[in-house]
Image (tube, rainbow, N blue to C red):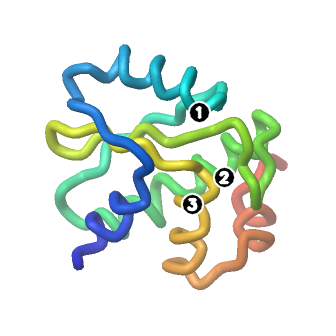
Amino acid sequence: MTDADAFLRLAFAQAPAAEANSAIARTREEQGDLKSYELLLPAENPRAFLLDRALPKLVDYLESVGAKLPGCGGVFLSVFSGDTLHFIHARDALQLLSEWSGLSLAELKRRYGPR
């Protein structure tokens, strides 16, 4: 299984990327989650992108909006990959990225959370 596959299999739902606006709105309503954090997963080196670029910004965002680690309540990720939009609970994404980075959630919060 590729890194992209491992990350995207965390998705609780999918939709065509061309229907992103309506799909995100529908998912917000269905999940009761108020915020969608959007990112584009590159085809090349997705693990490096997720750990080096996306993870620090995601942790800072989650902590800043009150979606505190480890639960990250109220936020799901809307991940564009190819022509598909994948919806992933922030807590599930953070758990996998924590494992990949070798850092605990507490360490991620310390390193990347708001100062």
Disc 3 crowd rating (10 Å Cα; few below 14, some 14-19, many 20+) is some
In the image: residue 52, left or right of residue 1: right
In the image: residue 41, left or right of residue 114: left
**Which secondary structure, mark 1?**
helix
Three-letter code for the amino acid on which mark 1 is drawn: Gln
Q: Which of label 3 and label 2 is nearer to you?
A: 3
The residues tagged by marks 3 and 1 sit, at their Cα atoms, a distance apart of 15 Å
**Which secondary structure, mark 2?**
helix
Q: Please state the horizontal and vertical placement of residue 51, each as a whole percent of the image.
A: 47, 66
The residues tagged by marks 3 and 2 sit, at their Cα atoms, a distance apart of 13 Å
Q: Which residue lies furthest to the bottom in this view?
A: 102
Three-letter code for the amino acid on which mark 3 is drawn: Asp
Quarter of the image for the N terminus: give it.
Answer: bottom left
Three-letter code for the amino acid on which mark 2 is drawn: Val
Marker disc for residue 42: none
Upstream in sequence: badge 3 or badge 1:
1
- Kindly indicate the quadrant of the structure image that contains residue 28: top right
Marker disc for residue 92: 3
Q: Which of label 1 and label 2 is nearer to you?
A: 1
**Which secondary structure, mark 3?**
helix
Marker disc for residue 59: 2
Marker disc for residue 31: 1
Is the residue under label 1 in contact with that under label 3 (CB below 8 Å)?
no
Instruction: Determine the residue positioned at 59% across, 84% down.
Output: 102
Q: Please state the horizontal and vertical placement of residue 97, each as a whole percent of the image.
A: 53, 69
Instruction: Determine the residue positioned at 82% across, 38% down.
Output: 66
Disc 2 crowd rating (10 Å Cα; few below 14, some 14-19, many 20+) is many
